[in-house]
Amino acid sequence: MTQPRRAVVIGGGIGGLTAAVALHRRGLHVTVLERARSLEPVGAAISLAPNALRALDVIGLGDEIRGLAAWSGDGGLRTPSGRWLSRSSAERAAERFGGPLVLLHRATLIERLAALLPADAVRTDAAAALADSGDPGRAARVTTADGELEADLVVGADGVRSAVRGALFPRHPGAVYSGFTTWRVVIPVPGARFASHETWGRGRIWGTHPLKDGRVYAYAAALTPAGGRAPDDEKSELLRRFGDWHDPIPAVLAATRPEDVLRHDVHHIAEPLPAYHHGRVALLGDAAHAMPPSLGQGGNQAIEDATVLAHHCDDLAAYTAARLPRTTAIARQAVRVARLSLIRSRAGAALRDTAMAALSKAGPALFLRSFDGIADWAPPQRPYASEHTPAGNR
């Protein structure tokens, strides 16, 4: 495949915009087609680990995002009563993996990414469909309401229900329900002072984390049939499920309005795709390897995908070879962690908690060790847009 000169990105989320920026910096003419009327993201906050921050160094954004890090001091894993099962610290994590963990609102990252593109690169309210995946001698074609676009490279970044994936691999079963739903809020909580934590109950989890702008990001998950909704509102549902859990959870719920709560069922790709490309089309992010959020790596892997794709944009087989084994392994680990954290039986949860506490006492870095091979990843190319970045942060 010759060096692509025109790229069309279907999907204007974090992965799609990162790919667009990386490809633009490689000299490609890039068009992003987003079906929504604006780039306002679906979701609340995102956790960016050092691996994603090093990928953002490639497009010159890493240091700016590192500056938004808010986690300091201790954090870790707790029980609903508040007992600590495992402790970790931001400083130890940064030392182990070469950088901080950054929590920020998705809208902040979307805004920063979009600002790195030419003004006319992003088209919103622009539903698109893949008409032809192309081959080495023929351009790929994408249809839109305004006509057809030809491209040397098409990037399918259209999420867990990806139509591009379905067009490339029609026999693949697609995403399946993971067995649990999630709730998320980003709100101000006056007077809140707490250590960043995740709490595991029986078939339920909760997490509370401070953001740099003073707000609080909280999320919850519970085993429940797909498609469920609260009979009244989702804040009331959270109060029923988590209202008697340890501080600061009651204070977060008290500060939450029903309209602040986002609820989404979680789906993942259980059967890996045979490849992340076909013809002149490449898939990234949830379109390629949707995974449960239990490791906080979904968006991080999409950002990695984007920079690796830009590096291999003239050889999509090399992109698949670089990304499919890694993301498959991480997705499987995310499924295992989700099952562990959401154990429903009383005996199973008690055994899990005892084991976690014992392992933590034996080695305080238990939590951090689970991210070895994930958070210490580095992109295949030097940060060609931010050569000033200190080597320890790459």
Image (cartoon, rainbow, N blue to C red):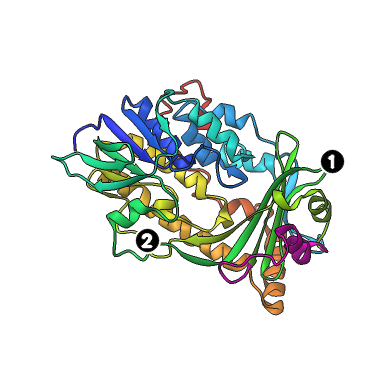
Nearest the viewer among 125 and 191 is 125
Whether residue 384 is in magenta: the answer is: no
**Residue 117 sits above or below residue 169 on the image:** above
Report the number of numbered marks: 2
Instruction: Give me the residue at 53% from left, 25% from top.
Output: 390
- Hey, which residue is sitting farthest front in the picture? 145
**Which element carries disc 1, helix, strand or loop?**
loop
- Residue occupying image coordinates x 60% and y 63%: 181
* Residue 61 higher or lower than 358, as above or below: above
Res. 379 in view: no
Report x, y in % for residue 201.
Answer: 72, 67
Disc 2 on helix, strand or loop?
A: loop
Highlighted range, magenta: 223-244
Q: Is residue 177 left or right of residue 204?
A: left
* Amino acid at dot 1: Pro
Residue 240 on the magenta span: yes
Q: Residues within 10 Å of mark 2 (few under 14, many from 20)?
A: many
Which disc number belongs to residue 190?
Answer: 1
Query: Mark 2 — residue?
Result: 272
Q: State the residue at coordinates (15%, 40%).
A: 138
* x and y, in percent, of residue 83 in the image: 80, 61
Observer-nearest of 383 and 229: 229
Relative image position of residue 7 (x, y in whole percent): 31, 34
Query: Compared with residue 228, is residue 300 higher up or lower down, i.e. above or below?
Result: above
Q: Nearer the viewer, mark 2 or mark 1?
A: 1
